[in-house]
Amino acid sequence: PGGAEHYANFIDAIRSGRDSDLTSPVAEGVLSTALPHLANIAYRVGREVKYLGSHGKFVNDPEADMLLSRKYREPFVVKEVV
């Protein structure tokens, strides 16, 4: 996995519109990157955090929640629901 073939496969799947063309499921990538992102947030707030994956938020922690996404500037704003 990785390298030029990986990127080409991703672009080909986007062009075909079929996720079945991917050599690795998108969910696998999400799971692979979630833990480092959550660890980075804990490091940035300087304490242990508790994350509720089912809700996509931290437990009673608005400061950590703010680090889950960013405010984009026009014209690069991403809608809440895509």
Image (tube, rainbow, N blue to C red):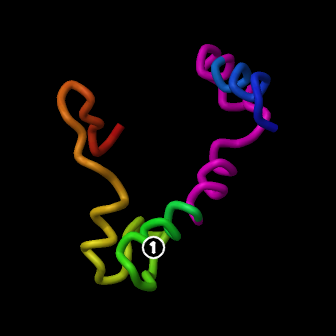
Q: Magenta residues: mostly which secondary structure?
A: helix
**From the viewer's perspective, is residue 48 above or below residue 21?**
below
59 left or right of 80 in image:
right
**Which quarter of the figure has residue 3?**
top right
Element at badge 1? Answer: helix
Q: Is residue 76 magenta?
A: no
- Which residues fall within the magenta stretch? 12-35
Amino acid type, callout 1: Tyr
Q: Quadrant of the C terminus?
A: top left
Identity of the residue drawn at 38% across and 75% down: 58
Q: Quadrant of the N terminus?
A: top right
**Which quarter of the figure has residue 13?**
top right
**Which quarter of the figure has residue 47?**
bottom left
> Nearest the camera: 20 or 35?
35
**From the viewer's perspective, is residue 77 above or below residue 75?**
below
Identity of the residue drawn at 77% across and 35% down: 2
Q: Say few, some or many: other residues with alpha carbon within 10 Å of mark 1 (under 14 / 14 to 19 / 20 or more).
A: few
Question: Which percent across, then down, holds residue 6?
Answer: 75, 29
Residue situated furthest left in the rendering: 74
5 left or right of 27 in image:
right
Identity of the residue drawn at 48% across and 66% down: 40
Question: Which percent across, then down, holds residue 68?
Answer: 37, 59
Q: Is residue 27 magenta?
A: yes
Kindly identify which residue carries mark 1: 43
**From the viewer's perspective, is residue 69 above or below residue 47?**
above
81 left or right of 36 in image:
left
Question: Which percent across, then down, holds residue 36?
Answer: 57, 62
Identity of the residue drawn at 42% across and 68% down: 41
Circle count: 1
Question: Which percent across, then down, holds residue 69?
Answer: 33, 53
71 left or right of 35 in image:
left
